[in-house]
Image (tube, rainbow, N blue to C red):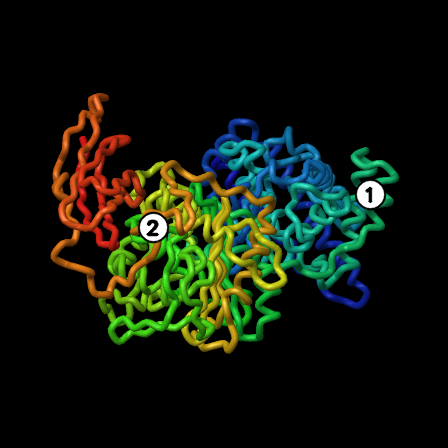
């Protein structure tokens, strides 16, 4: 039976009206003949369907290959709340955003089904009554007033891409629609239509159309907007509102009138919708975080939907901020911003430049990842290492005077010196000589090692070994590196990997937040001391105190201006400069970057307080400190007496000492020093624990097992250290 039906359909498809002699006055007859032929084709098509019977129809449908119902669609970048950050066109340049029934306004669905396919829920893919009506209208009125294609038939045509103006094409469309209904649910078919329907130009699907023509998602539509989107696919090129706004208006109003006759809209709503204007220009599709989203898309090209940690609202606010501030600073100046939650390392906003399409600012360059000189932004880590190792306390005194370190003679930014200041003040004023003195004491290699613990990838010039110049910016790092480093300080010294995608196996920008914790960047007490100092740093001119721990930096030659900071929840970084590395006279972190950083925190909302001090913090004035901590001595000054420097007699370096800590039977650890000049101060992991004015023996109660560094400092500031394992 199905083979007979196939032959009947083929015969109908081959049938064509014979040539009509062209004579004067026969134009009406020629047009009428064509109309009768087309109407006859429609009626013959209905007759074939009716005569084929259920068995024949089943055979026909079963023998019809199913059209591929997984068409390619635009890659979507969604924020942490599911909002669209950015979409990428498909290979041929069309914007085809996937849509489903839950993502569009129910009013739009009601108007669409009422106007296009009222019996969509009940027919099997073909509406015979609609075909009869279309055929009768063609015969009686000379034109088709309402089409006979169902939404399923339209979807089949959109999937197949073939022409349906001929009878053969219409037959193929009907067979495909009937087969489609056998394999997909009504909801799935409707979702395919919502994704594939043409809306003019290179715009396909209701979501892309709503964003392009209305500047909004289709989730909430007015009656006028819903009717406009229903009308446009019927003739997407002749009703394009940017070219033919009146045609678009007339088509929209017909949909509204039809909805009024069906009882979907009342009279008042109809009149209000008719008075609404028609959009006359395209809106750009969202392009949030263009540098980051392009990198993630390139890293996982097979993924159609990327779910990111970013917040689309915050991203838009900070992109506007970057554009505004860069414009005020100069035509070639760019600006980058990175914001993350330091508890989990989730990136909330990533602004790679002041404008992607701005060639003067080289907006295509992602300055959150570019290697630049960090200026003074590494100083907090230097001071933290000095606190951790017992070489300094925030209230220790240190000299800011002209000093030479071999052939290296650092000077301050303002070319002036402050004399003797506290370490706290030296960091807040970003003095260079004290920072280099402390770096000389802790060692440049140690600084690089701790940076790497924080996830920083420092690049040294010409692969040279680290020297003292790295403390003032003589190393290449990125804005992402610095934000990672400050996130670790904000977390009490514990490193955290910054990540941007919520999808598993998302490449380098994804990491399981439950992964094991690496070695600390700083001791918790040292990290807290650094944060407390930075939180009290002077605010930029004409700026109110921010309640944020922050540090600024300016690279050599005024090429880079930095400001990095954190509160109890967020960490943020700002870079300002020229992407080509050219100097910008007068560009300084405190003036160019710090005001932007404070504005970033203002747009983040209320401040989250910094955490309280951890146990073991020594609160004392300079005069109250133990003698070895009252003043930071120049590590290059000759030792008072190298022969009688203190040495730790017990415990010996590298020893494993069983104190019963793992068996809940703890005992004290004996400490002994030989040589040196009393009084002595004992420190464990950088924190003073015992002070014995004259005795060379002391005891200390550990809090638990593990590695500890024990140090003793005598009255002349000379120290000895050992590392042991307590069990």
For marks 2 and 1, the one nearer the N-term is 1
Residue 608 visible (yes or no): yes
* Residue 82 picture location, percent across and down: 54, 42
Query: Which is more toward the observer, 564 or 187?
Result: 564
Q: Quadrant of residue 641?
A: bottom left
- Against 337, residue 559 (above or below) is below
* Residue 649 picture location, percent across and down: 12, 42
Q: Give how far apart the Cα atoms at labels 2 and 1 are.
A: 78 Å
* Residue 555 picture location, percent across and down: 42, 70
Query: Which is more toward the observer, 351 or 600?
Result: 600
What residue is shown at x 37% (from left), y 70% (from top)?
401
- Against 186, residue 718 (above or below) is below
* Residue 370 picture location, percent across and down: 40, 64
Residue 286 visible (yes or no): no
In the displayed structure image, the side of residue 145 where residue 602 appears, left or right: left
At numbered mark 2, what does the secondary structure look like: helix, strand or loop?
Answer: helix
Query: Which is more toward the observer, 706 or 713?
Result: 713
- Please rate how many residues cluster around mark 1, counting C-alpha atoms within 10 Å: few if below 14, some from 14 to 19, many from 20: some
Q: Which residue is mark 1?
A: 257
At numbered mark 1, what does the secondary structure look like: helix, strand or loop?
Answer: helix
Tag on residue 387? 2
What residue is shown at x 72% (from left), y 64% (from top)?
243
User: In the image as oriented, which residue stretches furthest toward the front?
Assistant: 694
In the displayed structure image, the side of residue 53 where residue 500 appears, left or right: left
């Amino acid at each position: 039976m199905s083979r007979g039906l196939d032959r009947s359909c083929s015969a109908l498809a081959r049938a064509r009206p014979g040539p009509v002699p062209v004579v004067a006055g026969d134009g009406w007859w020629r047009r009428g003949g064509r109309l009768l032929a087309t109407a006859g084709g429609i009626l013959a098509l209905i007759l074939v369907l009716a005569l084929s019977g259920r068995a024949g129809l089943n055979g026909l449908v079963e023998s019809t290959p199913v059209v591929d119902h997984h068409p390619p669609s635009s890659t979507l970048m969604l924020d942490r709340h599911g909002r669209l950050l950015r979409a990428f066109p498909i290979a041929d340049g069309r914007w085809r955003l996937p849509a489903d029934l839950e993502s569009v306004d129910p009013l739009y669905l009601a108007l669409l089904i009422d106007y296009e396919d009222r019996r969509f829920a009940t027919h099997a893919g073909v509406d015979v009554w609609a075909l009869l009506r279309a055929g009768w209208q063609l015969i009686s009125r000379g034109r088709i007033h309402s089409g006979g294609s169902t939404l399923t038939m339209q979807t089949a045509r959109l999937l197949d891409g073939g022409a349906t103006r001929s009878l053969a094409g219409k037959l193929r469309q009907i067979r495909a629609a009937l087969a489609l209904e056998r394999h997909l649910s009504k909801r799935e078919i409707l979702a395919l239509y919502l994704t594939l329907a043409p809306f003019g130009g290179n715009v396909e699907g209701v979501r892309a159309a709503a964003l392009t023509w209305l500047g909004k998602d289709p989730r909430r539509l007015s009656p006028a907007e819903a009717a406009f989107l229903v009308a446009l696919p019927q003739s997407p090129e002749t009703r394009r509102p940017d070219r033919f706004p009146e045609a678009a208006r007339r088509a929209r109003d017909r949909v509204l009138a039809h909805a009024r006759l069906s009882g979907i809209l009342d009279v008042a709503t109809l009149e209000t919708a008719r008075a609404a204007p028609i959009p006359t220009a395209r809106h750009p599709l969202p392009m949030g975080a263009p540098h980051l989203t392009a990198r993630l898309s390139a890293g996982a090209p097979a993924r159609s939907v990327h779910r990111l940690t970013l917040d689309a609202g915050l991203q838009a606010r900070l992109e506007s901020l970057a554009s505004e501030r860069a414009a005020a600073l100069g035509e070639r100046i760019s600006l980058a911003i990175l914001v993350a939650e330091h508890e989990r390392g989730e990136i909330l906003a990533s602004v790679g430049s002041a404008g992607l399409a701005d060639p003067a600012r080289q907006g295509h360059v992602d300055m959150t990842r570019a290697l630049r000189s960090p200026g003074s932004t590494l100083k907090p880590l230097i001071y933290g290492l000095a606190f951790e190792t017992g070489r300094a306390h925030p209230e220790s005194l240190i000299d800011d005077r002209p000093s030479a370190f071999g052939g290296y003679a650092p000077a301050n930014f303002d070319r002036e010196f402050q004399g003797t200041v506290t370490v706290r003040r030296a960091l807040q004023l970003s003095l260079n000589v004290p920072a280099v003195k402390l770096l000389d004491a802790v060692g440049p290699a140690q600084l690089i090692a701790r940076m790497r613990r924080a996830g920083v990838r420092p690049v040294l010039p010409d692969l040279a070994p680290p020297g003292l110049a790295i403390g003032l910016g003589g190393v290449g790092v990125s804005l992402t590196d610095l934000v990672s480093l400050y996130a670790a300080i904000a977390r009490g010294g514990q490193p955290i990997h910054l990540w941007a995608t919520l999808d598993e196996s998302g490449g380098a920008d994804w990491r399981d937040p439950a992964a094991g914790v690496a070695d600390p960047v700083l001791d918790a007490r040292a990290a807290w001391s650094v944060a407390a100092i930075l939180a009290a740093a002077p605010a930029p001119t004409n700026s109110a105190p921010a309640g944020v721990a922050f540090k600024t930096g300016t690279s050599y030659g005024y090429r880079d201006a930095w400001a990095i900071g954190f509160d109890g929840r967020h960490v943020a970084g700002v870079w300002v400069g020229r992407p080509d590395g050219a100097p910008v006279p007068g560009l300084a972190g405190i003036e160019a970057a710090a005001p932007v950083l404070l504005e970033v925190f203002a747009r983040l909302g209320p401040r989250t307080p910094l955490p309280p001090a951890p146990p073991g913090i020594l609160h004392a004035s300079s005069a109250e400190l133990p003698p070895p901590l009252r003043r930071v001595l120049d590590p290059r000054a000759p030792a008072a007496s190298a022969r009688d420097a203190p040495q730790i007699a017990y415990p010996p370096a590298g020893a494993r000492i069983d104190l019963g800590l793992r068996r809940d039977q703890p005992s004290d650890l004996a400490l002994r020093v030989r040589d040196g000049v009393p009084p002595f101060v004992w420190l464990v992991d950088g924190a003073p624990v015992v002070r014995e004015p004259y005795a060379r023996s002391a005891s200390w109660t550990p809090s638990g097992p593990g590695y500890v560094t024990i140090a003793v400092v005598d009255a002349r500031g000379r120290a000895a250290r050992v590392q042991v394992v307590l069990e």
